[in-house]
Amino acid sequence: MFSTGDEIVEPGTRRPPSALFDANRYLVAELIERLGAEATDLGILADDPQRLAAALASAAAAHDVVLTTGGVSTGEADHVRTAVEAVGSLVFWRVAIKPGRPVAMGVIPAAGGSQAAFVGLPGNPVAAFVTFVRVVRPLLLRLAGALPEPLIALPVRAGFAYRKKPGRREYVRVRLTAAEAGLTAEKHAQDGAGVITSLTATDGLAELAEDTTRVEPGATVGFLPYAVLVG
C-alpha cells in the first residue's frame, strides 16, 4: 500500500506551504484491517515513473494485492497508470462514478509465474473511500474465498435537492435524522472530495443511479450506511 505524490508528506513532519499531510494510507489501512486482511505500509512514493514502476514490481513480488492512492488521473504528475503498464497491464481505468472516476485496476506479474492484483485509488480522501468500498472491498472478499452479496441500499426520504449528470452513479454523503415521515437523509454542506470531515460527520452514502438527474426533497433515495460498507 502506497500513497503517491511529491506534494504528500508524513503527518507529524514539517509541512511546506504547497504540501498535504497524508491521510489516505491510514484510512486505507484501517479499511483493509476491518476486512480481516493484513496491510503493509510501504510509505509515500514520489512522482517519478521509473521509481514508481520499480516499487510496484517489488510490492507485487511479496503481496497478493498492491494498492496506491493518487496519481491515476490525467495531470502532468499523474504517473501511476504509466508505471503499471510498464510492469504489468491495466484491466480498466476510469469508472462512471462520482466521486472516484479515475480509479484503475490491473495485474502485475511476479516471479515464479504468480501475479498480484493492482488497484489505483484517487488521491482525494472521499474518492479513495468510495472506490475502496465499491471496488477494493469486493476484490478482497473474493480473494479471501467469500462470495460477497450485492450491497442493498435502504430506502430513506431525501431532505435535500440535488442535480446530477445522467450516465454516472453518484454517492452523496448524508446523515440520517428521524422525522414523522420516517428517516430523512440530510446532505452534508460541503461536496468536495477532499473534505475528510464530510465522512466523519455523516452516517453513510446516498446512492443515486445512472438514470437519475434530479432529486427533490421528499423523494426516496437509496442509503448505504458506513457500518455496512466498512464491515
Image (cartoon, rainbow, N blue to C red):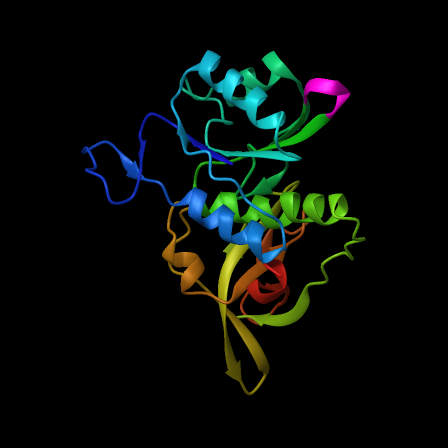
Percent x, y for residue 93? Answer: 63, 27
Measuring 52% from the left and 16% from the top, which residue is drawn there?
A: 54
Q: Does the rendering let one see residue 29? A: yes
Would you place residue 108 above or below residue 217 in this image? above
Q: Position of residue 108 (x, y in %)?
A: 66, 22
Q: Front-most of 34 and 72? A: 34
Q: Is residue 160 visible?
A: no
Q: Residue furthest bottom?
A: 180
Locate residue 231: give its quadrant.
bottom right
Which residue appears at 74% of the width and 19% of the height? Answer: 112
Residue 41 location in percent, x, y? Answer: 47, 39
Query: In which image quadrant can residue 197 be found?
Result: bottom left
* Figure label count: 0
Q: Is residue 17 left or right of residue 160?
A: left
Foreground of the two, 53 or 224: 53
Q: Nearer the viewer, residue 210 or 37?
A: 37
Q: Is residue 58 above or below residue 195?
A: above
In the image, is residue 32 part of the stretch drawn in magenta?
Answer: no
In the picture, measured across the screen, residue 146 lies left or right of residue 192, that is right
Vertical arrangement, residue 178 with respect to residue 88, above or below: below
Q: Nearer the viewer, residue 73 or 90?
A: 90
User: Residue 57: where, in percent of width, then height?
Assistant: 58, 20
Q: Which residues are magenta?
A: 109-114
The residue depicted at 67 percent of the width and 35 percent of the height is 64
